[in-house]
Amino acid sequence: MSTLFRGWPPDRLSQIYGWLKPDVEICSDNYCVGRPIPPMDPELNRISLKPLPLVRATRNHIRQTLIRRRARAAAVNWAKSREFDVIYSYPLGRHPFYHELAVEISKTLQIPLVIHVMDDWLLRLEKEYQRSGNLRAWQKEESSWLNLFDHASGHIGISPEMESAYLKRYGRTFIPIANSIDFESWNVRRDSYQAKDPFKIVYVGGLSKEKEFAALKRFRDAVLSLRESGLSLQWIIHSGISWQDTLNSEFVVDSLVVNGGPISHDTLPEKLNEADLLVLALNFDELSAEYLALSIQNKVPEYMASGTPILAFGPSGNPSIEYAKRERWAMVVDIEDPLTLQSALKTIMNDVDRRREIGMRAREIALKNHQHQDVQRRFINILRSAAA
């Protein structure tokens, strides 16, 4: 979502981050709290009755509490040396440290906080804590999130589905703002839909088991099967640094499934344009489907803007999949069936007119719904309203 801040004066932005280096072209005043803030794992939070594990758990809890306390104090002191009008934060489910820090800075400096929820972490965490049997930990986690919602002056969601669901659950309106495209800088235009040899498929994004890992493995199986049937194709996967080990061990197959390496924002339009097909994949299992039931994937507008045809593989009911079906910007496979997926892939590989139809429709809808200037204007108005 860094596109929301593109074009802002760099001296009007400051950022606190964990460990992945931020884009210094957008914001040059950055503070790193470091990686020692561990994620919360419900399975590891269970208290054992065995003496040794309990001692270890207690020592670990004390150590992590001290680490968090020191990191929080240092970040608050850093924030005190700046003059902020508003704080923008998007909470991450297994890292409550960050949204709790945002609340603390907001209270300490007495400046408003705007939050941007991009996935339904609360529902997923509730399910995981229930499965682990650690209801006390869930009550603490839920209290932290509800405190965040109560304290925030502005609430942003990711989709109309989230806006409706969160209004019912929490009595607050989370204004939907998804990713946007600056078409003025998106200077690559597709002028041909003739396929390459081999047919070039591209995926850009993470390999999270909570979102897309299983679906991408199914897609990998389909690609392998089509090669065995004699079709000439290649799948290139671009994932961030943190996914490289998973990519190499779980996906790469000689010259068929290739690690394309991390991809920068500047080179993204060109890489998407070079593809014959882009793949969007979302897991079908119940837990993933619930977790993603209110989310629009950030890559969707970028895929659409490229004008490259898209194959969307994911469950019905997911906002990204329903958006694709409603607006016809992708060929959709919404059942987890290998033969159906292979058939759809063969169809789009062999039909240049279908590829052109999907690609042109995708760009048309992106121009209509995801113009950077329009989305950023709405975003700025929310921040200004909170600051006022």
Image (spheres, helix red, strand yellow):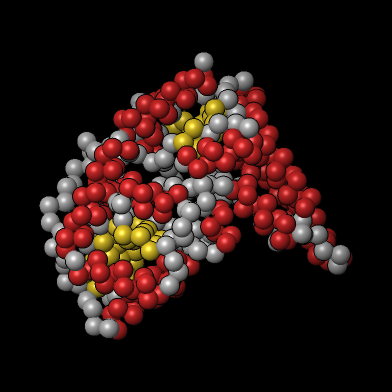
* Viewer-side residue, 23 vs 100: 100
Indicate the position of residue 11 as horizontal and vertical percent values.
39, 25
Residue at 16% in and 51% down:
190
Q: Nearer the viewer, residue 205 or 321?
A: 321
Residue 221 versus residue 327: which sits nearer the camera? 327
Left/right of residue 162 with respect to residue 180 in the rendered view: right
What residue is rendered at 24% in x and 55% in y?
358
Report the residue at 20% width, 54% height from top: 357
Point out residue 330 in the picture as x, y percentages from the top left corner.
31, 56
Relative to 80, say whether 249 is above or below. Answer: below
Towards the viewer: 194 or 242: 194
Q: Residue lying farthest top?
A: 388
- Point out residue 215 in the picture as x, y percentages from the top left corner: 45, 66
Counting the numbered discs, the total is 0
Q: Is residue 384 visible?
A: yes
The image position of residue 3, as x and y in percent, is 36, 38
